[in-house]
């Protein structure tokens, strides 16, 4: 990947925060790589090399700076706007696809060849898939060392290392010292249980009020709460159960996530899910500039420059929410979800006020008679079919295919039409171009002065200039309606 040395040197000389997360500077004389905002003295131009990702710098033999801490930079590596295949691969790596597999298996899930995937990673990120996975593991471990009081053994397993020996060897080789020496603040190590708190960086601005409003409107009783400036929920992830809380960090420059999990090895996937849920890898400035070229969207973008497209926590849960929302309001759908949870969700102790249950599992809903909750038999059959499909294929909702393939795969499920499939793709699979054109909320937002709403076909044509960011356009339109999400649509 070609980088303009002179232009990039001006970026680091001015400590331009706009490039934080998308540019890393390696210093030949010290063997360290830094963020553009590093407070250290700017090195001479002939002594620096620029890389498009932390993984590329680390693969070239440089170690992370201890002052600017590259592990806390906004994670823009997954958001390039240049390769959907790389973006989907990054999502799978974040969710642990490389922990128990290899590049060939990852390429197979994406439907491309191994050599092609390697070429794409080299072109867009300057590093191999293996290097990206290893760098993410090391940087998460470094963040846990700096921001928590976990013991080094706990940090090793919480960051995805298979053994303490490998963890120690990696840090000794990379930093020239054992991992414990990187902990600046001394004190007692954290207990085996208890919550940890981590910073989740993003590129500003960030419209937290809209994000929290979206989540508050669909908080399922017992599973989620959204009070004050914080969102909380229960979870069951890769053998771990617990609860978490997300709110703006005190300095207003990141989100602060507090996590209590029964098994620390689930931390990498939990963090990855939070990054996707809160859309932390996107570039709102670039997206906004593209959408603002449309006169319809320009005032909406100006009103909310930091608006994000909310993701989803879990695939099965999102699909069930979408089915429940067919042809009824958000409030009615969430009320139904709360009743299902109270009946079929496993109780959870210790989550605090309002967090009492885990969302029902596919096994719990496959054979449940949910029609007794006042929904049509056809919709109950759809819920059972989705539950069975997830049991048969746990990777059903993984972000491995392109948008068209994903929508086709979802529409093959009984009772799942285009609106539901597009909505799941938008929320869960983080497809930036997903667009549920049959949604009533979108049609209402674009009604003419006489109240006539565009048809799904007309809306699809109207949205063509918004590609490849139609999901963000939809979020602006929903927010402009003060509904913050679709109110349901005919399938």
Image (cartoon, rainbow, N blue to C red):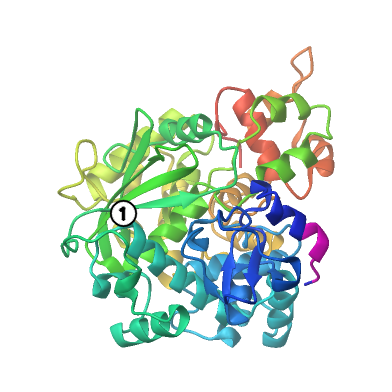
Instruction: Using the image as rendered, state which of residue 176 and residue 98 is in the foreground.
Output: 176
Residue 312 can be seen in this image: no
Q: Secondary structure at mark 1?
A: strand
Left of 305 or right of it: where is 336? left
206 in the magenta segment: no
Task: Identify the residue shown where x is 30% and y is 36%.
Answer: 221
Q: Position of residue 232 (x, y in %)?
A: 33, 41
Quarter of the image that includes the N terminus:
bottom right
Q: Which residue is mark 1?
A: 235
Task: Identify the residue shown where x is 47% and y is 30%.
Answer: 213
Residue range corresponding to the magenta coloring: 2-8
Furthest residue to the top?
Answer: 450
Q: Is residue 443 above or below residue 162?
A: above
Q: Quadrant of residue 284?
A: top right
5 in the magenta segment: yes
Q: Position of residue 74 (x, y in %)?
A: 56, 54
Q: Position of residue 456 (x, y in %)?
A: 75, 37
Quarter of the image that includes the C terminus:
top right
- Mark 1 is surrounded, within 10 Å at the Cα level, by few (under 14), some (14 to 19) or many (20 or more) other residues, namely many
Instruction: Using the image as rendered, state which of residue 428 and residue 115 is in the foreground.
Output: 115
Left of 106 or right of it: where is 85? right
């Amino acid at each position: 990947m070609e980088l303009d040395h002179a232009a990039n040197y001006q970026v680091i000389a001015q400590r331009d925060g706009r490039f934080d997360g998308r540019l890393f500077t390696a210093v030949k004389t010290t063997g360290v790589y830094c963020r553009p905002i590093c407070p250290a003295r700017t090195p001479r131009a002939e002594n620096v090399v620029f890389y498009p990702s932390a993984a590329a710098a680390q693969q070239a033999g440089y170690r992370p700076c201890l002052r600017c801490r590259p592990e806390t930079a906004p994670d823009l590596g997954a958001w390039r706007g240049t390769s959907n295949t790389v973006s989907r691969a990054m999502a799978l790596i974040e969710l642990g696809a490389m922990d128990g597999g290899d590049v060939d298996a990852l390429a197979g899930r994406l439907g491309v060849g191994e050599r092609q995937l390697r070429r794409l990673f080299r072109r867009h990120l300057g590093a191999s898939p293996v290097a990206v996975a290893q760098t993410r593991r090391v940087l998460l471990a470094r963040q846990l060392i700096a921001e928590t009081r976990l013991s080094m053994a706990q940090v090793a397993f919480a960051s995805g290392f298979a053994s303490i020996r490998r963890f120690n060897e990696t840090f000794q080789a990379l930093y020239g010292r054992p991992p414990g020496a990187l902990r600046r603040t001394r004190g007692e190590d954290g207990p085996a249980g208890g919550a940890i708190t981590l910073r989740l960086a993003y590129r500003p601005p960030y419209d937290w009020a809209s994000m929290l409003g979206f989540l508050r409107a669909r908080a399922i009783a017992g599973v989620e709460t959204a009070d004050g400036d914080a969102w909380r929920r229960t979870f069951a992830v890769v053998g771990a159960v617990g609860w978490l809380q997300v709110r703006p960090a005190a300095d207003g420059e990141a989100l602060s996530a507090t996590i209590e999990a029964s098994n620390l090895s689930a931390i990498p996937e939990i963090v990855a899910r939070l990054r996707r849920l809160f859309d932390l890898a996107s570039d709102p400035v670039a997206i906004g500039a593209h959408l603002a070229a449309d006169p319809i969207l320009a005032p909406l973008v100006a009103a909310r420059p930091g608006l994000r497209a909310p993701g989803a926590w879990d695939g099965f849960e999102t699909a069930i929410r979408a089915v429940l929302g067919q042809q009824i309001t958000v409030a009615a759908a969430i009320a139904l979800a709360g009743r299902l949870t109270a009946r079929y969700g496993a109780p959870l102790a210790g989550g605090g006020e309002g967090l009492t249950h885990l969302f029902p599992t596919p096994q719990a809903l496959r054979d449940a008679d949910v029609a007794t909750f006042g929904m049509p038999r056809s919709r109950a059959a759809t819920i059972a079919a989705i539950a069975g499909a997830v049991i048969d294929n746990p990777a059903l909702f993984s972000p491995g295919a392109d948008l068209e393939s994903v929508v086709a795969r979802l529409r093959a499920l009984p009772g799942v039409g285009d609106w539901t499939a597009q909505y799941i793709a938008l929320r869960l699979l983080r497809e930036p171009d997903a667009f549920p054109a049959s949604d009533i909320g979108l049609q209402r937002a674009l009604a003419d002065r006489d109240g006539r709403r565009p048809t799904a076909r007309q809306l699809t044509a109207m949205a063509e200039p918004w590609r490849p960011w139609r999901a963000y356009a939809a979020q602006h339109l929903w927010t402009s309606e003060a509904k913050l999400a679709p109110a349901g649509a005919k399938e």
